Amino acid sequence: MKLLEQKILSEGRVKDGNILKVDEFLNHKLDIAFLNEIGKEFKRIFADKKIDKILTIEASGIAIACIAAQYFDNVPVVFAKKAKSQNLDGDCYTSVVESFTYKKSFTITVAEKFLKEGERILIIDDFLAEGKAVRGLIDVINQAGAIIEGVGIVIEKGFQTGGKDLRGLGLNVQSLCIIESMENGKLQFKEV
Amino acid sequence: MKLLEQKILSEGRVKDGNILKVDEFLNHKLDIAFLNEIGKEFKRIFADKKIDKILTIEASGIAIACIAAQYFDNVPVVFAKKAKSQNLDGDCYTSVVESFTYKKSFTITVAEKFLKEGERILIIDDFLAEGKAVRGLIDVINQAGAIIEGVGIVIEKGFQTGGKDLRGLGLNVQSLCIIESMENGKLQFKEV
């Protein structure tokens, strides 16, 4: 998605430790018109899929998933929670996720009633690096016996192993842009 | 908002401890078409205000704020973060918030660059009970020297003190519905 690459080049910043900051539009301040362009693009890519539900993970995934859902006939969005709330009662699927960003493990939780056997799920998230968060979502989908129709990622770090690993599992992983390298603060994108 | 009251009556559940669960449509599974109705209603209520930015707090506020922003000429949404990420660098406004739901305190963080002096801010959140989260948002807005044009709340618990306290400060607090009581699991709404 050329528009996304341009946006990253103009508003993103590369920090030490292969960190790409996109807080100007994607995960702290949110550019709503641009999120609509992202949503349209996900719909274009997954146009041939029948999607019952979009699954994402708090917090950054929520904005992207909700705006995108509008282009999928307003299918419901479910977001996996990172903390066990006093308000989360009933039976839950859980999975342990290691976070690249936060450098610790956390448990994600999805109420069982929100993922049903046979439902066709589109996973959406902002970043794919090592793929830990997506693997957690896959785990809860598998526990539910639901079907993974695709994985839509805004920014994939192609120099980390998550994308390769997930595609190796036969998953339909579609990233709107793939960063091939960010050596010396210079971003190189792979053609997608 | 009658549609919201009906939605709460049909899909919400009252739990012990004055907890209203609306995870079926507002804060775990998200009903995107319904969130659009909420967004339209916020626009109707704040139609005479010039809003530069919507400020909310992760996680549940994000979905509501993003969908609503579309009815405010796609103004940017900024969400206060609850955890200090490795990725949050630069100068930040912070405020300590006590959580009614999680029964502990946490620090919210907003990058200084995303709240500017003189900007006209609309605060949006899902619940107003004791008003702790909104007070944290007000605190960071005040630190920035920005202007609070209004506070848009989806569900106010009118039997708790947050709404009264915030209105007592002269804030334009608009709740789409106000629950007057939930004794014995029975919801009573106040006319708004």
Image (spheres, coloured by chain):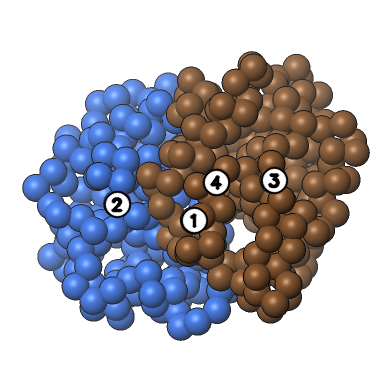
Chain colours: A blue, B brown
What x and y, as percent, mark residue B6? 51, 55
What x and y, as percent, mark residue B112? 71, 31
Q: In front of the other: label 2 or label 4?
A: 4
**Given the image, on which type of amino acid does mark 4 rest?**
Lys
Q: How far apart are the two marked residues, 2 and 3, measured between alpha carbons? A: 31 Å
Where residue A190 sits, quadrant-wise, is: top left
In the image, residue A151 sits, relative to residue B152, either above or below, namely below
Q: Residues within 10 Å of mark 2 (few under 14, many from 20)?
A: some
Which numbered disc, 4 or 3, marks the residue that appears first in the sequence? 4
In the image, residue A110 sits, relative to residue A123, either above or below, namely below
Q: How far apart are the two marked residues, 1 and 2, measured between alpha carbons? A: 17 Å
1 and 2 marks in contact (CB < 8 Å):
no
Dot label at residue B7:
1
Q: Residues within 10 Å of mark 1 (few under 14, many from 20)?
A: some
Q: Quadrant of the N terminus of chain B?
A: top right
The residue positioned 73% from the left and 25% from the top of the image is: B149
The residue positioned 13% from the left and 43% from the top of the image is: A47
Instruction: Say yes or no: labels 1 and 2 on the same chain.
Output: no
Dot label at residue B191:
3
